[in-house]
Image: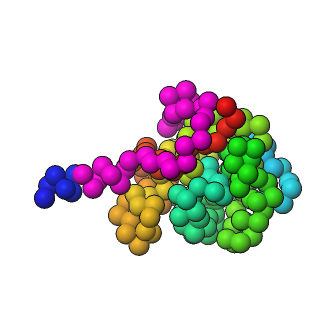
Amino acid sequence: MTACIVGLGLLSFTTIDHDKTPSKHTASSIKGYEVGDSATDFKLKNIDGKKVSLSNFKSAKGFIVIFTCNHCPYAKKYEDRIVELDKKYKDQGYPVIAINPNDPNVQPEDGYKQMIERAKQKGFTFPYLLDEGQKVFPQYGATKTPHVFILQKENGKNIVKYIGAIDNNYEDPNDVSEHYVQDAVNALIKGEPIKMTKTVAIGCTVKVKK
């Protein structure tokens, strides 16, 4: 019985990817940020055609930056939960900033036009940005969609406080036992230490040209 439970625990935390498009950016080749690092700001095109930077959000206390996309089945499973995170936390100072890191020439479903359509269909309440030229995701070290980076403003800098998954059950939101992002943001709001600052991101690999 114990062996079964351990096995299930490992399975729920295994990084699976049914989308095997080759990538020049592998998990081993992308260093990215670690918890405690200062994240560089960016300026990326939103689905409304405007450029968005973290510096635009003057009253924000931090950010829930999520690398996600249209086509990935894992990302699709989390869309409603991402909307709920934004609705719950943006008024408390931690808005969601979603970024599509994929090259649309490799994965056409993740093109800019398709992003606009998907955001409208799902009722996105947050910026959905295109990482044109794929310059931002390697800086962060995002390797999956979805992949979360929680930032907190400290002395004019955006400090990385959490990296990883949204929760521990991508398949069923009603069967989640560990709410990693919620717990981390709640801790920041309360001024308490985050108990789990890094988890394994579950999702599809970021799609780049060979």
Query: Taken as a whole, is the magenta stretch helix, strand or loop?
Result: loop
Is 84 left, or right, of 9 in this rendering? right
Q: Position of residue 200 (x, y in %)?
A: 43, 45
Is 193 left, or right, of 85 in this rendering? left
Is 49 left, or right, of 135 in this rendering? right
Position of the N terminus by quadrant: bottom left
Residue 61 visible in this rendered orientation of the protein: no
Question: Which residue sits furthest top?
Answer: 29
Is 168 left, or right, of 37 in this rendering? left
Does residue 17 show up magenta in the picture? Answer: yes
Q: Residue at x 21, y 57 (%)?
A: 5
Does residue 37 show up magenta in the picture? Answer: no
Q: Residue at x 35, y 54 (%)?
A: 12
Foreground pick, 75 / 188:
75
Q: Position of residue 39 (x, y in %)?
A: 63, 37
Q: Which residues are magenta?
A: 7-36
- Up the image or down, 181 lies above or below 19; here it is below
